[in-house]
Amino acid sequence: MPLRLEIKKKLSARSDRVKSVEIHPTEPWVLAALYNGNVFIWDYESGSLVKSFEVSDDNLPVRCAKWIPRKQWFVACSDDLKVRCYNYNTMEKVAEFEAHTDYIRYLEVHPSLPHVLSCSDDTTIKLWDWEKDWNCTKVFEGHAHYVMMVRFNPKDANTFASASLDRTVKVWGLGASDPHFSLDGHDKGINCVDYYPGGDKPYLLSGSDDRTVKVWDYQTKACVQTLEGHTNNVVAVCFHPRLPVLLSGAEDGTVRLFNSATYRAETTLNYGLERVWTLSATQSTSEVAIGFDEGTIVVKLGSDEPVASLDTHTSKVVWSQGGTISQASLKGLDPEEAQDGEKIQVAAREMGSTEVYPQSLRHNCNGRFVVVIGDGEYIIYTSQALRNKAFGTALDFVWSSVGTGDYAIRESISRVKTFRNFKEHRTLKPAVASAEGICGGALLGVRGPDCVLFFDWDDAALIRQIDVAVKEVYWNEAGDHLALVAEDAYYVLRYDRDLVVAALSANAVPADGVEGAFELLHQIEDKVGTAHWVGDCFLYTANGSRLNYYVGGQVMTLAHLAAPAYLLGYLPKEDRVFLGDKQGGFLSYQVNQAVLRYQTAIVRRDFAAANALLAEGRVPAAEYGAVARFLESQGFKEEALQVTPDPDQKFDLSIELGRADLALELLEAAGDADQGTTEYATKWKRLGDLALGKGDLALAQRCALASDDLSGLLLLCTSAGDLQGLAALAEKARALGRANVAFLALFLQGRVEECLDLLVEGKRHAEAAFLARTYLPSHVPRLVALWKEAVAPQSEKAAAALACPAEFPNLFEDFDVALQVEQLFLQNREQRFPASTWPEAKGQLDLDLIAFLKGQGGGGGGGGTAPPAEETAPPAPAAAEVNAPPPPGDGAAEEAQRPAEEQRAAEAAATAAAAEAAAAAEAAAAEQAVAAAAATQAAEAQRLAEEQAAKQAAAEAERLAAEQRAAQEAAAAEAERLAAEQRAAQEAAAAAEAQRLAAEQRAAQEAAAAAEAQRLAEEQAAAAAAAEAERLAAEEAAAAQRLADEEAARKKAEEEAASIAKEADDILDDDFGDDW
């Protein structure tokens, strides 16, 4: 039967002709030597070019390149007769030397010694030692034609074989220069040679220009087999180190695979890239690299999954390597050796070999039997002595989870057979287009292209069809849960055995199966490699890099894998899960069974069993953190809070549960190392949010202080009316450089002077000046001066455009009244009223004091500071009367009128003084009225405060309204500031516009004068040009007239000559007639 190896292309890289390829033993790299003089390193997992080396300076062909992985080198030979060595990590050239006198065909690296063999068209083979500065330590001579290839014997590295165009294969030893013997049998030259890697056959492989491949026994020197099929020269051959196949490549563009045991042709590969030149396979992987005329191909043969099976009953593992079955016990491992992720050293016992090449090994449900599947056949052996129990042909084989000798086979894509106690029981013909595989377990599963059908083992009745394209089905040991593994996800289902048994017993199974037999629990988006159930926990490898387990809808990572590994099973006694790698080694990870049982009990809501596991101490304290995270994921946060030892998780849970007291204790207990960190401040802020939500303002304020949440602290202080807190906040914010918070805190306290200082410190002189104009106008001159000093270095004009009330009082309306309002503000700002008096006080707060004082006569409509009353000038009409000039020439009348005028002036002065006194009295009355109003307001506020003691809720609403009013006032002040800025900007813009217009006018005048001068010059030039043109025209006219006269004279002369000639002709005609 054929091997039916799955062949998957992993890399297809186009390039120039590839003369040599080799796969790296540990990295997913392939080394390709090109005919154009380059060497490429390809990553066949990602398909990317890792590195490129230009080996030959003249683009001469590189015929071979080989890894030296223990030195992180590769060596390459080219047609310039040189061998070069490079470090493939640093890309440094390590060595370069001339090796032969003709083309070098091949290089071979010794597996353990510092030796490299080279063979050449000069018919010699040379041995090079890199520890001796790449000196040639031996020359092997004996071939009569080109030596095409050399290969070390993997079983005896002191011998090697060579292939030559002299039609022989010679076997050599490193200790002698002459060959041990020759193998002769090909009709034409031999291009390639390879050794069989196994220890059971002393075979050698050769490929020739006679289009055949021969298998030699180098002990008997006989040809064992000749393989045919190629239609052109065979240029590459190799035994696969892991699989029972040999490969050959030829110039016909194909690679043929043969079974190395039966020599039967398995398959032929043709990728349409013209001729094949080279092949490479390695022990570490199942990949094969192929070099063509037009690029490099890497294919994967079969699977990397180890052929092994773990019997959980006896703790013994059985595996196959090269057709030999071995067994080892994993029971009682030394804890020092059984470290997580470390290779396990096992004492292997060879049990024998099988008649088929094993591609899969599986124990039955109780571990008494093991089946070997391969070559389209199956053989059932006893697991201890490897005695044959049953055999047959099958495409697939699965065990039942119930009967010892119950199993099923897939004979074809349309026929499945079941066996009971090793006897054929029933035949199934599934209603699917193609039965692509079968799955064992509590029910027999048949996989179709896009569905899976489940049948009862006994009656072969259809239990249910599930329309999901699955790769594998895994059942738990109890048979009540299963996982359907698809390409990129898996589905966890619950199986209702009782419902199915009842339907089968009543013979009431519908044609489409039992409704409700399966219930979907969860769909998990993850790529499953290999898997195993441990109780109700689904353990699996994900993407080849993680070991995960599913329980209750949650997926947790047990370990990260250093390299791809494949799950074998779980041993409860060892409390470890075991995996195998593609090299045939075993490794393990600890899985605490008590933790799994606890998680399973939580999923089943069996809290009594879960608590018993904790109370009995079966769950180690080191696992409490993982248990708490699982409880939290399941929604049991209170229980997680009681279990977790992690302070961070405990804090998070206490916040989520609203346990502010516990969260505060955790923060207070934090060490010095945690304090001062961002995470520590974040925790205080979270606790503050919780406290604020609970209405605990004191705790919220403490949290805001601890976390430096000054904005939150500002909100708390203003909400609580905490004046002392605002003062402290202002100082802290100022110290921390939080100017906005400091400004608001100072402003809310009425400390406007300090607000101005804060703005000046921040170089915000414009804002300071406008703020002073609104609240403290007496500070405006000082701040405007500072503003000018700050602006002057950037623009002297802008600084000059700034107006000061001291210099331009006419530009500042009601400035003198604003100074009086400032005095009233300073006298009354220390009076504090409770927020409960807001309804009565808001009318007073909304009062326009400037309009009020103006209405009382306390200020004028102009700008500037009002002079004192005693220095006030008399009214304008009186002044006009006093200062009126006397009529000229009337001195007596003037003397007579002077006393009357002085009397009238005195009366006017008295009137003015009375008016000033009345104004002063009115101002005093206004001040007394304001003071009285303030006193009345204070009394009323005190009364209202006492009445509103029991109405805190209403007061809170009123407080919010007051804050809104304050915000509106601040907005109004800001609008006033912006308007003032706009006026100043408009004035500055007007001045600049005037200056610009004057400059433009001057420029226009200058441009007009220049244009006029240019016009005059152009007119003069035009006049001169016109005169010159007129002169030239006259000259041209005179010349034309002369020419016309000459032409007329010439025509007249021609007419006269013609006339004379005609007269002469007439005379001759008359005299001589036609004879003329």
Image: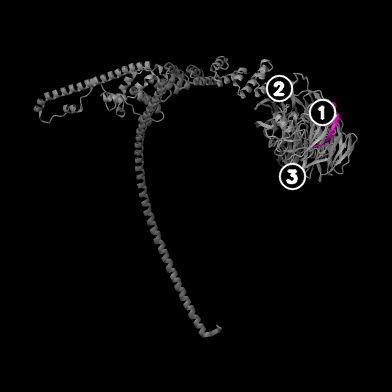
Q: Quadrant of the N terminus?
A: top right
Asked if marks 2 and 3 touch (Cβ < 8 Å), the reply is no
Asked if marks 1 and 2 touch (Cβ < 8 Å), the reply is no
Q: Principal SS element in the magenta part?
A: strand
Say which of 1014 and 789 sits in front.
Answer: 789
Magenta region:
380-394
Quadrant of res 794: top left
Disc 1 is placed on an element classified as strand
Instruction: Name the side, left or right, on which 543 lies relative to 1059.
Output: right
- Residue 627: x and y in percent read 65, 21
Give the mark nearer the N terminus: 2 vs 3: 3
Q: Which mark is residue 591?
A: 2
Can you see residue 1029?
yes
**Distance of label 3 from label 1 (alpha carbons):** 47 Å
- Residue 363: x and y in percent read 79, 28
Instruction: Name the side, left or right, on which 548 lies relative to 232.
Output: left
> Is residue 457 on the magenta stretch?
no
Q: Amino acid at mark 3?
A: Gly
Give the mark nearer the N terminus: 1 vs 2: 1
Mark 2 vs mark 3, foreground winner is 2
Dot 3 alpha-carbon crowd within 10 angstroms: few under 14, some 14 to 19, many 20 or more: few
Say which of 474 and 106 sits in front.
Answer: 474
Disc 3 is placed on an element classified as loop
Q: Which mark is residue 272?
A: 3
Give the mark nearer the N terminus: 3 vs 1: 3
Residue position marked by numbered label 1 in the rendering? 369
Q: Is residue 58 above or below residue 304?
A: below
